[in-house]
Image: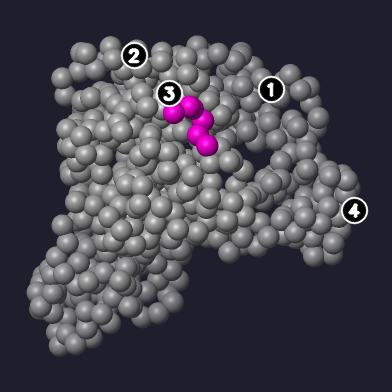
Amino acid sequence: MQLKDALEILEEIVFYLELKEENVFKINAFNSAIRNLSRFDVSLKEAFDKEIIQNTKGVGKTIQSILKEILEKNESSLLNELKSEFPPEIYSLTKIRGLGAKKIKKLYEELNISSIEELEQACIENKLVKIPGFGEKTQSSILENINKLKTTKGKLLLHHADFIYDELEAELKKIYKNKFSPTGSLRLRSRIIPKIEILFENNSIQKKIIEKYSLKPIDENIYAGIFNDAEIYFIFTGEKQFYYELLRTTGPESFLNKINFNSLKINEFKSEDEIFDKLNLPFIPPQARENENLELRFYDFPSLNDLKGLIHIHSNYSDGSNSIKEILEYAEKKNYEYVLLCDHSKSAFYANGLDENRVKEQWREIDEINSKSKKVKILKGIECDILPDGSLDFEDSFLEKFDCVIASVHSKFKMTEDEMTKRISKALKNKYVKILGHPTGRLLLSRDGYPLNLNEIINVAANEGKSIELNCNPHRLDLDWEFHQKAISKGIKITISPDAHSFEDMEFVRYGIDMAIKGGLEKKDIVNCFSLDEFLKIFCQKQ
């Protein structure tokens, strides 16, 4: 079990303690421990073995013993005891955006609501408006969020789907010796994965596989089931037809029509490349097949090895898990030339944002580390908050001292489209801002982007010579691939940024590569493909 999974158990304990109106100091102690431990990207066992838990501020003996029990028994007796005092589904209400323990307690006490279904019915019957602190606007928002939750149920973010597929693949490799491959939306590397589809080459243990995973037939040679709460489809085909079926089941239909797939007179091929040769077409990687606007031509698509810079990395100066030295060592191991460190600015108090004095302290450490580093250069960046009026979190006289400034919106999302567009446009016109971070602010399957005229923002960025970030955290994937061609047609370079707070997050660049290919970006379109000298001279020179 990972430490972060154990912290989720602590969060659930906090929820029930708040429902019971337990001592506020006790609740604060749990919250403090969760916050301080969330910086560490390790397993629970490793957290104990390295004495991270024992030596972290705010993690007292009581919480240590709870975590120890979770490590040994995979559960918490305290949590089980607390849950027994309430209806079994009450914690599910926390899935509804905007509902915390205090509001859930009111709903339970006033209307005896303890499940999402009961809450939805109460909203439909207009019952929430009678509860102090709710009202029509809150009721409407809750109902909207319930509907959103229902539409996303069963869908997976790309990295979650990868994790489940990896577990499934590891099991299958032990018993299935013939070829198999992900197909469908997972192979297309879509933002959202509705089901995990796998194509198998037929062999004698097909029946055993079907039985092992309790699969049900839904069509000829197609079987469906559930694995780790995800819907899975197993598709079986002949050995000689494998690559034909791989291309067909990867799809999508629009791409198959575009390449005249149905014109093929045979279905036996030794690779997908051979099929494209047969159709007199260059090979188009699966990621790009979802983009209907791309031409059928050769593209100089990027790979992970083409990324020379690791951009938008948070350290433990703000809300990251790792020290600057640890980040440098990671970058050396991955053969990067440079790292743009971008901790939060002072308005992001919730993320331990840096004020001017702490920034200067960080700069001194960066200078010291760079003086000893021969392979990788750490650049002095900041993720600077765009304030509601479009001004920035630091004065220009301070911003000019950074190597590169990323500007992002982190607050006041509920502005009108016109207000938000003017806010971001004003920030882009600041000569020290070089990159616009996660431009729409969306969180996939969780939060829509704020109202924004993105086409206008792209125009402003182009006029001001700014880059737009492709934030490749799989919860964001923002700038969306559907806007990539619009951006590069205006001369904008795209920055692939993991927005990383841990080593695990730094690996998200692979999703950035997937989305860049999907958007039709080539190496020349991507800021990270610049060498260190090019990055400093062409892109991040101070004006």
Residue 28 is tagged as: 1
3D distance between C-alphas at marks 2 and 4: 56 Å
Q: Residues within 10 Å of mark 1 (few under 14, many from 20)?
A: few
Question: Residue 392, how many percent across, how many down?
Answer: 50, 34
Which residue matches tag 3? 398
Q: Quadrant of the C terminus?
A: top left
Query: Mark 2 or mark 1: which is in front?
Result: 2
Of callouts 4 and 3, the N-terminal one: 4
Q: Residue at x 84, y 45 (%)?
A: 133
Residue that carries the numbered disc 4 in the rendered image? 130
Q: Which of pointers 1 and 3 indicates the residue nearer the eye?
A: 3
In the image, the segment drawn in magenta is 391-397
Residue 414 in picture, x, y percent from top left? 63, 50
The answer to whether residue 228 is seen in the rendering is: no
Which residue is disc 2 drawn over? Answer: 365
The amino acid on which the numbered mark 4 sits, given as a three-letter code, is Lys
Q: Is residue 138 left or right of residue 420?
A: right
Of residue 468 and residue 504, the one placed in the foreground of this image is: 468
Residue 336's image quarter? top left
| Residue 127 percent across, percent down from the top left | 86, 58
- Whether the residues at callouts 2 and 1 have beta carbons within 8 Å, the answer is no
